[in-house]
Amino acid sequence: MHSIALGFRRRVSARLFSRLSRDDVRDAIAGRPNLTAWLAGALSAPVRPSAARAVLKTVHGSLSTEWIAQRVNAPVVVLHRHPCAVVSSWLRMGWTGRTGWRVPRELAVRYTQDDGGLPQAGAPLSPTEWIAWNVCTLLAHQDAVSRSVPMSYTVDHESICADPHHVLRELAHAVSWRWTTSIDTFIRNSDRPGDGYETNRRMSEAASAWSRHLTSRQVQVIRDVQSRFPALHRWT
């Protein structure tokens, strides 16, 4: 009966989640869930892994990576991605409703060593500028984490897109994960159009998609902010 109840909860939760708009999801991530989002979360139930090992992927846990690593005896993989690609993704996902610092400003101070030149919380910057400051701070923090956390591994998004089977197979070997033909199949099946919260992407297009979605002015704004972070200079 317990498994039946869990299955029912998951089906109801998934159905409620499917009714949420992109704005609803954005508000829920920001801690302002509407009733439908709250119910979807309250009824959700964890799925027991079918294998002895499991992968936990998060795009919102960057600032908690060190905390997680201290409590979980598991490898940590940090994905390095071009700042323009991440900013473009935030803009396309509609994460522009909140301006100002979304991450602690002192992190930006730490990674730029330039307190006097950083914008204050109420500075009248454009959404692209504010997103760039937050994204670059997060990416610089990820770079620092990859250097300080034991059992941490890094992989470049561009490298994965260029040769996913080879790069991911090497990563699996590094973290002692057994490679199977089902993984190859999953990678092949994921190489198709997708957007938003979908996980499918055309790999040949994913790495450079930002260049088609950002204006030249937006790219320059991002690069100006990126230049303030020494850890991100490899993308200049």
Image (spheres, rainbow, N blue to C red):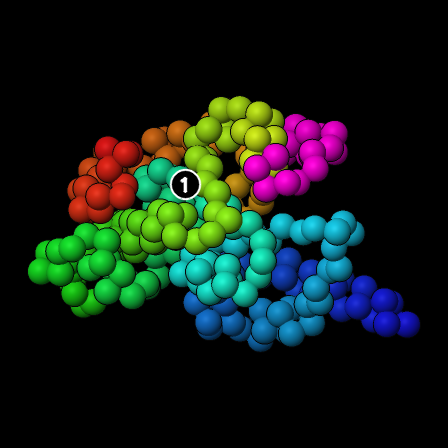
* Corner quadrant of residue 46: bottom right
Residue at far right of view: 1
Judge whether residue 96 is colored magenta. no
x 19%, y 42%: residue: 227
In front: 169, or 42? 169
In front: 5, or 68? 68
The segment highlighted magenta reads 173-192
x 13%, y 56%: residue: 114
In front: 191, or 166? 166
Residue 218 percent location from the top left of the image: 24, 41
Residue at far left of view: 116
Residue bearing the label numbered 1: 80
Residue 51 percent location from the top left of the image: 76, 49
Q: Quadrant of the N terminus?
A: bottom right
- Residue 190 visible in image: yes
Q: Is residue 1 above or below residue 131?
A: below
Residue 228 percent location from the top left of the image: 18, 46
Judge whether residue 190 is colored magenta. yes
Q: Is residue 157 left or right of residue 188?
A: left
x 58%, y 45%: residue: 198
- Residue 164 visible in image: no
Could you tell me the amino acid type at mark 1?
A: His
Give the crowd class for mark 1: few <14, some 14-19, many >=20 residues within 10 Å.
some
Q: Quadrant of the C terminus?
A: top left
Q: Is residue 119 left or right of residue 130?
A: left
Q: Is residue 234 above or below residue 89?
A: above
Residue 45 percent location from the top left of the image: 71, 67
Q: Which SS type dominates the magenta stretch?
A: helix
